[in-house]
Amino acid sequence: MTVLLDVQEISKSFKLKGYWYHKRTFTALSPLSFTIEANKTLAIVGETGSGKSTLAKILVGAETPTQGEIYLHGQLLQKKRFKQRCQHVRMIFQDSGTTLNPSLTIQELLDEPLILNTDLDEKERQQLIHKTLQKVGLLGEHMNFYPHMFSGGQKQRISLARAIILEPQVIILDEALAALDPSLRSQMINLLLDLQQQMGLAYILISHNLGIVRHFSDDIMVMSHGKVVESGKTLEIMRKPKHKVTQRLIMSQNFKLK
Ligand SMILES: Nc1ncnc2c1ncn2[C@@H]1O[C@H](COP(=O)(O)OP(=O)(O)OP(=O)(O)O)[C@@H](O)[C@H]1O
C-alpha cells in the first residue's frame, strides 16, 4: 500500500493577546507525524482541548502550522496555495447542514466550488452536480430545492456532495456524524464506506464516539494536550489500551470490546 497523506512534524503555537511586554504563546500541537493510505480511515480521538480540531484545520488549510510539512502523493502541499488544498482535502463538520447558505439552491451551492476550482462549462457543471447528488443518495431534481426543504440527514448528504464534487483524496469528518440519530448515522456510515471504495478516499474521523470509531476506522491516534500519546490499529488499541488517556476515554464511555 502506498502512502497518500504524509504529515511530518506538524506543530502549532498560538500567540496570546494582551502580553505585548512579555510575548506569550500557547502550544496547541507539539510536533506530530503520521501517514494515511488511500481507502483507509484514521480516527483522531482525545479529550476536549487536546488539539484535534487545530490539526484538522491545518490539514484543510484553514490554519497555518507553526512548523512542519504535509505531502500528498509525495508532493508538498504549499501553505498559501489554498486552491490546491481545496481540491485535495475537504472537511465536513457536525453542523454542516446549518452552514449551507439558505438563499441558494442546491445547484448554486454545489456550483460554487466548481466555478472557483474548475474550467468546466455550465452544462458540464450541471451534469456533474446531477451525478454527485445521485452518488450521495439524493435525486438530480433536488438541484432546484433550497436547504430548508431537506431533513438534517439529507443536509449532511448535501454537505458530503459539496465535499466530494471536486474529487478530493482526503475527507476530514469533524464530528460529522454526531448530530444524526442512530439509524441515519448508520446509513451515512454505509454511504461513506461505499464512496471510500468507489473513489479511493482516505478519511480522517474526529469523533468522541468510540462506537463510531470502532465501526468505521482502521487506525486510531489518541491525543492529549497537543501530543499523540498512543496510535495503531483501532481494534488492537481498543482491546488493550496502554496509555492512561486511552484507558480513561474507553472507561468514560463504558465501552467494551469483546
Ligand atoms: N485561535 C486560537 N488561539 C488560542 N488558542 C487556541 C486557538 N484555537 C485553539 N486554541 C486552543 O488550542 C487547544 C486545542 O484546541 P482544539 O479546538 O484543537 O481542541 P479539540 O481537541 O478539537 O477540542 P474539542 O474536542 O473540544 O473540539 C485548546 O486549548 C484551545 O483553547
Image (cartoon, rainbow, N blue to C red):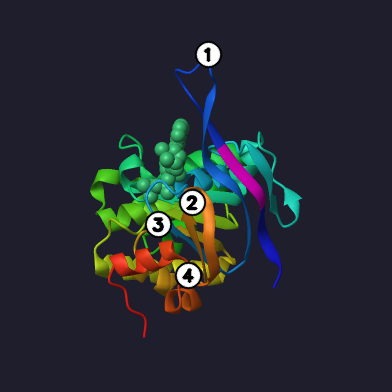
Front of the two marks 2 and 1: 1
Quarter of the view holding residue 212: bottom left
**Residue with the mark numbered 4:** 217
| Mark 4 in CB contact with mark 3 (< 8 angstroms) | no
- Element under disc 2: helix
Quarter of the view holding residue 4: bottom right
**Residue with the mark numbered 1:** 21
Could you say which is closer to the camera, residue 142 or residue 180?
180
**Residue with the mark numbered 3:** 140
**Residue 131 on image: x %, y %:** 48, 59
Q: How many numbered discs, if any?
A: 4
Query: How dense is the environment of label 3, judged by Cα within 10 Å: few (below 14), some, or many (20 and up)?
Result: some
**Residue 37 on image: x %, y %:** 63, 66
Front of the two marks 1 and 4: 1
Q: Amino acid at mark 2?
A: Ala
Front of the two marks 4 and 2: 4
**Residue with the mark numbered 2:** 163
Q: Amino acid at mark 3?
A: Gly
- Element under disc 1: loop
Q: CA distance from mark 3 to mark 1?
A: 59 Å
**Start and end of the magenta stretch?**
8-12
Query: How dense is the environment of label 2, judged by Cα within 10 Å: few (below 14), some, or many (20 and up)?
Result: many
